[in-house]
Amino acid sequence: MPDDANKRDSVVSLATVAALVEKFPAVKASEFRGQTRVVVPAESIYAALEFLKLQRDFDFLVDITCVDYLNYRGATDRFGLVYLLANTDTNERLTVRTFLNEPDLTVPSAVPLWEGANWFEREVWDMFGITFAGHPDLRRILLPEEFTAFPLRKDYPLQGRGERHNFPVLPRSSG
Amino acid sequence: MNNEEAIMAAPTSTPAAEPRQGAQAAAQRGVAHGGDAHGDESDQIGFLSPPHDYEDYQWTLNFGPQHPATHTTLRLVLKLDGERVVDAVPDIGYLHSGFEKIGESLDYNQYVTVTDRMNYISPMANNVAWHGAVERLLGIELPRRAQYIRVIISELARISDHLLCNGAAGLDTGAFTYFLYAFYQREVIYDIFETLCGARFTNSYTRVGGLMYDITPLVVDKIRTFVRNFHKTLEDMDRLLNRNRIFVDRTKGVGVLPREEAINRSASGPIARASGVTRDLRKDEPYLCYPDFDFKVCCAKAGDCYARYLVRMAEMRESLRIVDQAIENLPAGEINVPIGERTALPTKSMVYSTIEGTISHFELTMSNRGFEVPFDESYAATEAPNGELGFYLVGDGTDVAYRARCRPPSYIHFSLFPYLIRGHTLSDIVAVLGSLNIIAAELDR
């Protein structure tokens, strides 16, 4: 049964991918374990997402996340931004990826398309330091405001760098 | 006589004189506006409390991080106008413990212990979601028996989650007996899990390509007893709360989430289904062996706290049906993938008595051997009790994930909170929070 489901899933996605490639010729598509992924150049990511939302009815934003490919074998780019989209009518899923390199770590925010992108993008900013232009409220969300590093980057050690010095010391007398 | 009355009345009726003046003034203005009665009224309100003074009435209240109604550690900064919530700004991260960073240093079997601690109300569902994602990445097809057992434990986890969520929603709105009814049955489910894997709370029951232990006749017996008896509790719970005036008044029409907003704001699970979204991954993207079972997707249209409560009650009934069908049709056979695939650890008797078992165990536990993991990435989602729980995994050839991203439903549902609470009163906060079922450990990870 899962095999059938995967097959149907990819067949539906193929029409979407064909439409996307026709609109954006630079898009590269691939498939892995029954999932269709497309890689979109960073400069056309917003246009591609808008096309998918408005023309192909991907009304459900499942997740936005990021991968730091610093030590990854064969990787040419530093950061991979991942948008997981779904269509609630046809149950079609699509993974949209884009690659970013320092120093230009800015992409347009997806909040105008999906309100749900708000906290996803805040978390990616918090953990990876990727800026979302046009985001209504791009503050740190899980880490404290004073934190200076981006801990899910691969050059950040597992046990931390001793961020204590960033935090103000509150002596007993001040309270 | 008239004069006297006027003098007598003068000292006592000074407050009464003001409205008359106000009415006169309003009448004058009414004439100026063309005698429109509706215009008069609004003008009068504007006269009594000018709009630019509104800001002065607002005050800020910190709700949490230590508050009994948040159940866990989260904080809301509320802007209130009297008792009415003008705005709410969630402040989270108090329980952030870097689960995703830890996922980059623990191997696929070790990390299951961390998933227990994400949504600790239904840890079994997290175990199933995590190893489901790992098996998607590795391309492993589970034996039928393992799939059935995983369905049973995820549905039991769903029942235990909904019991807690609805029980606590009742508790927050004043129904204490109801909470005890729910908690007694959670205890029964903990007992089943303890018999199954030895742990009550942090189960860590699944393994890559299988399960830790096989299901024993005693567990089957306990699950059958639970299936037989749980209906009674559900009926009692229905009778206690469904038509309870206090509960209905406090939840009906409170925190309404329309269908379009639910989709646009990425809501999933019972919260989306209470708003009329029919998405349920068990039906829409069947995983494990869910197509084998006869069950319904429970939906409501109202989208308020009461609808979310009803959807959870109905889902418990459907979960019970799935558990019943699965336990009666449990296939025989292995619970782990065959030893030749070299993913699941062989049993101890195999390790000690066969050469294949010894070699396989040795190879799997060596730090430079382990599984064969592709250099690729995949996402796999399950319908967890709280909503879509998925893991985005990046494999890099080793048995440790290069990136283990969790898509936590609590995190997404908590971002709905300011939208749901605006315009309601302070006392509605506990009703809305209770209906969203925020688990802070999963929220902050």
Image: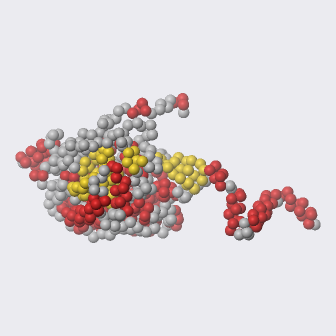
> Can residue B383 be seen in this snapshot?
no
Task: Identify the image quadrant of the N terminus of chain A.
Answer: bottom left
Indicate left or right for A130 with B109 as reference: right
Indicate left or right for B29 with B127 as reference: right
**How many numbered marks, from 0 up?**
0
Q: Write down the quadrant of residue A70 in the picture.
A: top left
Residue at (35, 33) in percent of width and height: A161
Query: Looking at the picture, how far across and down is residue A20, in whole percent?
Result: 30, 60
> Can residue B18 be seen in this snapshot?
yes
Residue at (77, 64) in percent of width and height: B28
Query: Looking at the picture, how far across and down is residue A167, in whole percent?
Result: 45, 33
Task: Identify the image quadrant of the C terminus of chain A.
Answer: top right
Indicate left or right for B42 with B228 as reference: right
Depth check: give the residue in front, B137 or B28: B28
In the image, is residue A154 above or below residue B207? above
Q: Write down the quadrant of residue A55 in the picture.
A: bottom left
Indicate left or right for B58 with B298 as reference: right
Residue at (69, 66) in percent of width and height: B39
Residue at (45, 40) in percent of width and height: A145
Query: Looking at the picture, how far across and down is residue B176, in whole percent?
Result: 47, 58
Depth check: give the residue in front, B359 or A84: A84
Colour mode of the rendering: secondary structure
Query: Looking at the picture, how far across and down is residue B191, in whole percent?
Result: 30, 55
